[in-house]
Image (tube, rainbow, N blue to C red):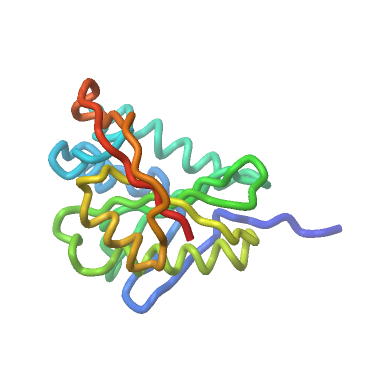
């Protein structure tokens, strides 16, 4: 009988980072960055307004890791053992392509960590999930995010309206879509 994959034991190491399955063990640090209104100003689903919202997210991430065929993978990003952010890949229905997303605490931004984590996640997804197409979205004013996408070799394929970030839900924004 074939042994089922235990996704929850997934570990991805880079030169300076470690990616671990996201979950309640990272509640305090996740809530600190996920509820930071200024840091999450360009996000559609953040900032979290309550600890309960962060708990719900983390419990959902933990539950997904336990599935035989997860639809998404949420990772905590650690640098020298310190939790500095999160990175994810959400699979399409056919599970042949994935959407990448990331966020970092302020003190970890501008150091190349998002690109380093994303490169490792892309390599892992190609090997473990046979994913060969990756996309990512961002607010058109989120310069750090779209520069990270370009650093990954992603190409901007569209700029559309109709984006509404959680912090200003009535303000229509432009959104970039990148693809690799």
| The quarter of the displayed image where residue 76 is located | bottom left
Residue found at the far top of this picture: 170
Tell how many labels.
0
Instruction: Please indicate whether residue 171 sits to the left or right of residue 162 in the image.
Output: left
- Residue 157 placement (x, y as % from top left): 42, 51
Residue 116: give x, y in percent of width and height. Answer: 35, 69
Q: Residue at x 35, y 60 (%)?
A: 149
- In the image, taking residue 7 as reference, residue 143 lies left or right, namely left
Between 145 and 121, which is closer to the camera in this rendering?
145
Q: Give the vertical position of 104 relative to 46 (above or below).
A: below
Q: Height in image: 162 above or below 117?
A: above
| Residue closest to the far right | 1
Q: Identify the residue shown where x is 26% and y is 58%.
A: 84
Identity of the residue drawn at 63% across and 59% down: 129
Residue that protrudes farthest toward the bottom in the picture: 15
The answer to whether residue 3 is left or right of residue 69 is right
The x, y position of residue 9, in whole percent, is: 55, 59
The image quadrant of residue 126 is: bottom right
Q: Is residue 149 placed above or below 139 in the rendered structure? A: below
Quadrant of residue 118 within the rendered picture: bottom left
Quadrant into which the N terminus falls: bottom right
Indicate the position of residue 158 as horizontal and vertical percent values: 39, 46
- Residue at x 41% of width, y 62% of height: 154
Front-most of 174 and 135? 174
């Amino acid at each position: 009988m074939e042994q089922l994959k235990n996704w929850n034991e997934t570990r991805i190491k880079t030169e300076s980072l470690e990616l671990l399955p996201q979950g309640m063990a990272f509640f305090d640090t996740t809530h600190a960055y996920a509820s930071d209104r200024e840091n999450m100003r360009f996000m559609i689903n953040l900032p979290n307004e309550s600890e309960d919202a962060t708990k719900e997210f983390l419990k959902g991430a933990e539950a997904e890791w336990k599935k035989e065929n997860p639809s998404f993978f949420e990772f905590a990003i650690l640098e020298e053992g310190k939790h500095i952010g999160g990175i994810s890949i959400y699979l399409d229905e056919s599970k042949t392509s994935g959407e990448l997303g990331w966020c970092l605490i302020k003190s970890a931004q501008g150091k190349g960590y998002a690109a380093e984590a994303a490169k490792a996640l892309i390599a892992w997804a190609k090997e473990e999930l046979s994913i060969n197409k990756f996309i990512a979205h961002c607010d058109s004013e989120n310069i750090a995010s779209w520069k990270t996408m370009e650093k990954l070799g992603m190409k901007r394929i569209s700029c559309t309206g109709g984006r509404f970030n959680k912090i200003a839900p009535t303000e229509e924004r432009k959104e970039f879509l990148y693809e690799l």
